[in-house]
Image: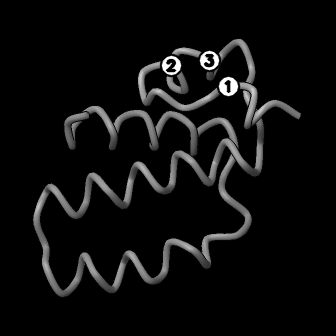
Amino acid sequence: MTYKQARADFEALEKIAELSDQAELDAERQTLMQSPNKKTACALYEMGIRLWFKQHGVTDETSPIIVRHSLPREAYEK
């Protein structure tokens, strides 16, 4: 997964609904601040995408994103 795609997918999900709990991302943000590069930022976006699906589940609209990130749809269905 590229940084550009991960960022675009995360931003698309956030337009649908924002994450209500981002505590798990806080530690990753610290890592990004210590090592600011696209690889670390991509990992942060990918974690955010997993958290988003954990909080909001999968819909027809978000299905292409979960497939693109090779996440198990059944793990995130509500």
Disc 1, disc 2: CB below 8 Å? Answer: yes
Q: Residues within 10 Å of mark 2 (few under 14, many from 20)?
A: few
Which residue position is annotated with label 3?
A: 63
* Residue kind at label 2, given as amino acid type: Val
Q: Position of residue 19 (x, y in %)?
A: 66, 58
Q: Quadrant of residue 11?
A: top left
Is 18 placed above or below 40 here?
above
Is 21 placed above or below 67 here?
below
Real-space Cα separation, disc 1 to disc 3, in angstroms: 8 Å
Instruction: Give the left or right position of residue 23, taking residue 9 as reference.
Output: right
Disc 1, disc 3: CB below 8 Å? Answer: yes
Among the two numbered marks 1 and 3 on one chain, the one whose residue lies closer to the N terminus: 3
Q: Where is the N terminus found, in terms of image quarters? A: top left
Q: Which mark is residue 67?
A: 2
Q: Position of residue 13 (x, y in %)?
A: 57, 37
Among the two numbered marks 1 and 2 on one chain, the one whose residue lies closer to the N terminus: 2
Q: Which mark is residue 54?
A: none
Real-space Cα separation, disc 2 to disc 3, in angstroms: 6 Å
* Residue projecting furthest to the right: 78
Disc 2, disc 3: CB below 8 Å? Answer: yes
Label 1 SS: helix
